[in-house]
Amino acid sequence: MLAMLGVLTTFLSFLYFTAPSIRKFFAGGVCRSNVQLPGKVVVITGANTGIGKETAKELARRGARVYIACRDVLKGESAASEIRADAKNSQVLVRKLDLSDTKSIRAFAEGFLAEEKQLHILINNAGVMMCPYSKTADGFETHLGVNHLGHFLLTHLLLERLKESTPARVVNLSSVVHHAGKIHFHDLQSEKYYSRGLAYCHSKLANVLFTRELARRLKGSGVTTYAVHPGVVSSELVRHSFLLCLLWRLFSPFIKSPWEGAQTSLHCALAEGLEPLSGKYFSDCKKAWVSPKSRDNKTAERLWNVSCELLGIQWE
Ligand SMILES: *[C@@H]1O[C@H](CO)[C@@H](O)[C@H](O)[C@H]1NC(C)=O
Ligand SMILES: *[C@@H]1O[C@H](CO)[C@@H](O)[C@H](O)[C@H]1NC(C)=O
Ligand SMILES: *[C@@H]1O[C@H](CO)[C@@H](O)[C@H](O)[C@H]1NC(C)=O
């Protein structure tokens, strides 16, 4: 009995003393760039909570004019006023953007292009995770529609501005779960088979593939692009899964805060000399390994073609 108690206390004190370094390990890298952004224009999608809000806050601190593009303008405004106060920067603006509706994406782009002559940083941050099966206004499966096609169209519509504002960057939030993803060309909308976990993985693989293909197409244009795994971050994304919420609670010491989760996005948006790594995938502020499936140029090109068809756009 006493022996057991002894083992238990030893174990607990071991945990107690190692927890901070375990915590630090999971917290990952920190963006160390000192680049300031006066006069620079940033668009960030879904920045009203979590990683997006932390990213927006840091960019505003550095003096950029930051457009928060989100579905719920009221929530966006409350985040924006917090950021304005915290960053002492009044240039934080909220615009309506619903990535599950191409009409809304076009309206946002039209408005933005009319009011801004420059765009230096686009952060495709918004995303949905593990929702029950549903379709967007245009009939796309929601994960594919929002995480991939919505940002694809947005990037397409804003690309001219980026090219006019070089050096410019596009940062795409992906995830390590792209390793489990697969592009099912015969069933892109998951009508024959649907799993909400897998649908999320597929859409994140699509993000990595697109970053590669876009980087290839933008070579020499002065616009570079990066895909980011933010880490396992506590965020509202898990709201659709009870089990995930439970696991989150259990493992919370090992999970990044939104501030920590924002670091790799910031690194890719700001760090000097990153241009030769355009098209690459980053985790913990470092270039990271991608799955063989995301290195498949043919799949990347085919997905590009199919996406253009689905959206009815020409993108050479
Ligand atoms: C980012 O990902 C979206 C969705 O996959 C894609 O449409 C877009 O082209 C990508 N942009 C960059 C710069 O990688
Ligand atoms: C795929 O594309 C990349 C970047 O455009 C290129 O460096 C690589 O050689 C290509 N791989 C194959 C097998 O063609
Ligand atoms: C994509 O479209 C281009 C232009 O229409 C075509 O040349 C190319 O073969 C297509 N690639 C794939 C993999 O379907």
Image (tube, grey):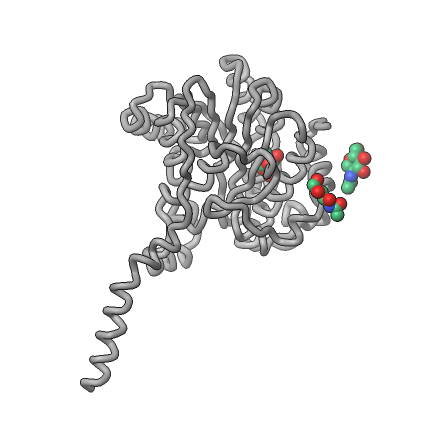
Quarter where residue 236 is shown: top left
Q: Tell me if I can see residue 247 in this picture.
A: yes
Residue at point 38% right, 33% down? Answer: 48
- In this picture, residue 53 sits left or right of residue 149: left
Quarter of the image with the C terminus in it:
top right
As drawn, 7 above or below 132: below
Quarter of the image with the N terminus in it:
bottom left
Residue at point 42% right, 34% down? Answer: 33
Residue at point 66% right, 46% down? Answer: 188
Q: Position of residue 50 (x, y in %)?
A: 38, 40
* Displayed-image quarter of ligand 3: top right
As drawn, 112 above or below 189: above
Quarter where residue 141 is shown: top right
Q: Position of residue 58 (x, y in %)?
A: 37, 32
Residue at point 50% right, 36% down? Answer: 268
- In this picture, residue 123 sits left or right of residue 86: right
